[in-house]
Image: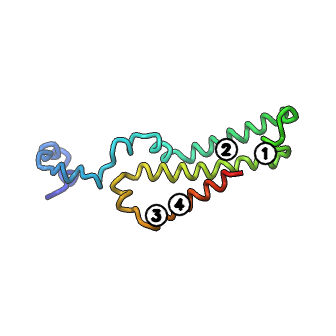
Amino acid sequence: GTRLFDLPHEHRFAALHRVNWRRALAANMVKTHREVHSLWGVFASIHRVILLHAVLFLALLLIAVENELPTMTSAVIGSKRSVRFAILGLIVPPYGFALLYARWEVTGAARRIQSCSAREICRLLYHTAWSLMWCVP
């Protein structure tokens, strides 16, 4: 048959009774409510904004506490300005892992099963290992 949206706009409602709803709402074509309406979906959509805010927040925080450094321990935050700003680089691995997980979460269960190959599993393990190695001091 014809697709519903191929019909003229004024005839679509009348043609709804002819739609094969089992086929139209098959699991491999439609995402679940959790996949569409979750915070992971929001993160996958606006991840660049979140990264920019996190970097700017930490950079300004490090600038703001510069005068208070004599009272803080240098082992925690570093004694030189370059060391303190190198801490900003530690944001990237957890951010990358969170982005990878968010995109995996909102892909859809049926699509994940279809694309679950050995190559994809190796890629996921590779990114996980690198994220963990960057986070360990």
Q: Secondary structure at mark 1?
A: helix
Q: First in sequence: mark 3 or mark 2?
A: 2
The mark lying in front, picked from 4 and 2, is 4
Q: Position of residue 109 (x, y in %)?
A: 36, 52
Image x and y of residue 6, in percent? 20, 54
Is label 2 in a helix, a strand or a loop?
Answer: helix
What element does badge 4 sit on? Answer: helix
Q: Residue at x 59, y 58 (%)?
A: 129
The residue singled out by tag 4 in the image is 125
How far separated are the C-alphas under marks 1 and 2? 13 Å
Hey, what amino acid is under mark 1?
Arg
Q: Amino acid at mark 4?
A: Leu
For the point 48% across and 46% down, which residue is it? Answer: 45
Q: Position of residue 124 (x, y in %)?
A: 51, 59
Q: Residue furthest bottom?
A: 119
Q: Nearer the viewer, mark 1 or mark 2?
A: 1
Q: Identify the mark nearer the N-term, 3 or 1.
A: 1
Asked if the residue at tag 4 contacts the one at tag 3, i.e. Cβ–Cβ closer than 8 Å, the answer is: no
Q: CA distance from mark 4 to mark 1?
A: 30 Å
Residue ID for mark 3 = 120
Secondary structure at numbered mark 3? helix
For label 2, count other residues whose C-alpha is less than 10 Å away and answer few (under 14), some (14-19) or many (20+).
some
For disc 2, the marked residue is 55
Q: Quadrant of the N terminus?
A: bottom left
Upstream in sequence: badge 4 or badge 1: 1
Circle nearer the N terminus (4, 2): 2
Mark in front: 3 vs 2:
3
| Left/right of residue 117 with respect to residue 26 in the rendered view | right
Amino acid on which the number 2 mark rests in the picture? Val
Residue 41, label in figure: none
Q: Residues within 10 Å of mark 1 (few under 14, many from 20)?
A: some
